[in-house]
Image (cartoon, grey):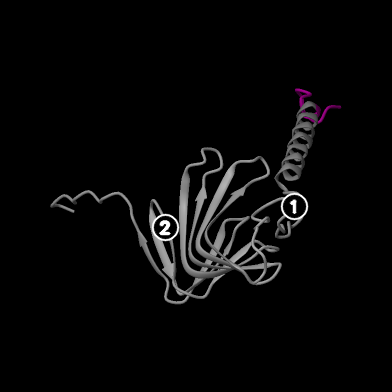
């Protein structure tokens, strides 16, 4: 004898089980896609020998005036240009600059992007880091920031200012508020 007169009880159970299995499989597939695969942590990339400013034709202990050192990426596009009033080679790995102006460029268009101005600085050719312990300023179209000391990584274009940091942000003029606001 059938549990129900219509005989649909068996059909309802089968469709319920089918829908339940379909729902559980959808949830399992969504959980697999939602779980991010752990990305290996990338270590801070060291400059490769062919990257950055490397060939500086100054002998250790000698000075040069008006040195301009271009910085090209691996594709040959200009990334930066360092201009120094006086350059002195301290040893095989270090250069001392006075009256430094370093200009970075947008690689795609090679138009000036940012300007770093330092009174004196020391540049490490191996690590491609420019360090200054005197007042330094960084200028861009939308801001100007200055600090008592700076460490600027030439390859990554990241810098750190420390001590008495002052920043001026330039932006669009604010619209005057309505009287009711």
Q: Which residues are the magenta region? A: 1-10
Element on which disc 2 rests: strand
Marks 2 and 1, how far apart at CA: 35 Å
Instruction: Say few, some or many: other residues with alpha carbon within 10 Å of mark 2 (under 14 / 14 to 19 / 20 or more).
Output: some
Q: Which is the main secondary structure of the residues drawn in magenta?
A: loop
- Residue 153 rendering spot, x and y as whole percentages: 60, 61
Furthest-top residue in view? 6
In screen coordinates, is 179 left or right of 122? left
Tell me if residue 108 comes above or below residue 130 in the rendering. above
Q: Is residue 15 found inside the magenta-colored segment of the image?
A: no
Residue that appears at 47% across and 74% down: 134
Q: Nearer the viewer, residue 141 or 30?
A: 141
Dot 2 corresponds to which residue? 139
Tell me if residue 147 comes above or below residue 77 in the rendering. below
Tell me if residue 2 comes above or below residue 159 in the rendering. above
Residue that appears at 52% across and 41% down: 110
């Amino acid at each position: 004898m059938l549990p129900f007169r219509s005989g649909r009880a068996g059909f309802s159970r089968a469709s319920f089980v089918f829908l339940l299995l379909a729902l559980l499989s959808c949830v399992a597939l969504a959980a697999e896609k939602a779980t991010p695969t752990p990305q290996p942590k990338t270590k801070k990339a060291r400059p490769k020998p062919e990257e950055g400013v490397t060939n500086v034709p100054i002998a250790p202990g000698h000075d040069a005036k008006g040195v301009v050192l271009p910085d090209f990426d691996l594709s040959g596009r200009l990334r930066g240009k360092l201009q120094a009033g006086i350059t002195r080679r301290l040893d095989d790995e270090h250069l001392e600059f006075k009256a430094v102006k370093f200009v970075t460029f947008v690689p795609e268009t090679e138009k000036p992007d940012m300007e770093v101005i330092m009174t004196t600085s020391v540049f490490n050719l191996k690590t491609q880091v420019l360090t200054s312990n005197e007042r330094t300023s960084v200028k861009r179209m939308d801001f100007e920031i200055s600090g008592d000391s700076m460490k600027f990584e030439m390859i990554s274009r990241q810098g750190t200012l420390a001590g008495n940091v002052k920043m001026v942000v330039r932006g669009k003029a604010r619209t005057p508020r309505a009287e009711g606001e």
